[in-house]
Image (spheres, rainbow, N blue to C red):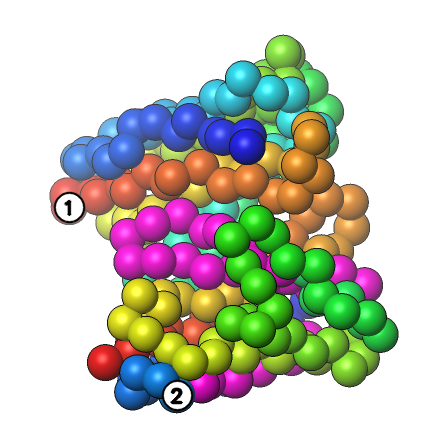
Amino acid sequence: SAVISQKPSRDICQRGTSLTIQCQVDSQVTMMFWYRQQPGQSLTLIATANQGSEATYESGFVIDKFPISRPNLTFSTLTVSNMSPEDSSIYLCSVEQGTDTQYFGPGTRLTVL
Amino acid sequence: GQQLNQSPQSMFIQEGEDVSMNCTSSSIFNTWLWYKQEPGEGPVLLIALYKAGELTSNGRLTAQFGITRKDSFLNISASIPSDVGIYFCAGYGGSQGNLIFGKGTKLSVKP
């Protein structure tokens, strides 16, 4: 399976600021995704990062709050904009390899004060 | 939207015991995946199931894709302390087309 890395692994940010999270894969993949995992909760899909076009957002998530870039088939970024304490979560990227199988990165643990 | 009902929510067992957890849905899924997440880590894929009735093993872990395509279970035999973590089921298919996650089963193993 693909090796996925994320930067930063964790961060503590002030309210009103923005943080960009990077996801790097060691092989080319078509499908990349961004998830949020709130404390003690399950994973919720934020968006599908499409290479060469705008990301596809799930209900409840908007581009102004979570802009996503996907410049090539091995890299994507997620920005959490104008942060509030409610944005404190683990943010995870994943890739699809094979049929209907996703592999996850180690996550970025974000705390907003 | 579609939901996966995962149970139990948590389990406290003695080392050496067998463990069973399951996921059910009112909708049909085409793929069932089981993940384990340890503190500070991302979910790690344990077993993937693609066909109704499929029974797959990975070491001490065994998972089955239910015949109705609406459920799946994961068994862990002879548990050990490093089995501790949160186990998530996830399913693909149905109207949403995205990977849907259960709420997780938190496993604690007493040595």
Residue B25 shown in magenta: no
By secondary structure, the bulk of the magenta-drawn segment is best described as strand
Question: Does dot 1 land on a helix, a strand or a loop?
Answer: loop
Q: Amino acid at mark 2?
A: Thr
Distance between the alpha carbons at the discs numbered 1 and 2? 45 Å
Quick check: A61 left or right of A84? Answer: right
- Can residue A39 be seen here? The reply is yes
Query: Which quarter shows the C terminus of chain A?
Result: bottom left
How packed mark 2 is, by other alpha carbons closer than 10 Å (few <14, some 14-19, many 20 or more), is: few
Query: In the image, is residue B81 above or below residue A83?
Result: above
User: Which residue: 41% across, 58% down?
Assistant: A37
Closer to the observer: label 1 or label 2?
2
Instruction: Residue A57 in the image: state x and y as whole percent.
Output: 64, 58
Q: Which residues are magenta?
A: A18-47
Query: In the image, is residue A10 above or below residue B1?
Result: below
Q: Nearer the viewer, residue A97 or B77?
A: A97
Tell me which corner region of the image, top left, top right, bottom left or bottom right, holds residue B17. top left
User: Which residue: 40% across, 48% down?
Assistant: A42
Mark 2 belongs to chain: A
Instruction: Residue A61 in the image: state x and y as whole percent.
Output: 54, 59
Number of the label disc, if any, that sits on residue B111: 1
Tell me which corner region of the image, top left, top right, bottom left or bottom right, holds residue A100. top right
Query: Which quarter shows the N terminus of chain A?
Result: bottom right
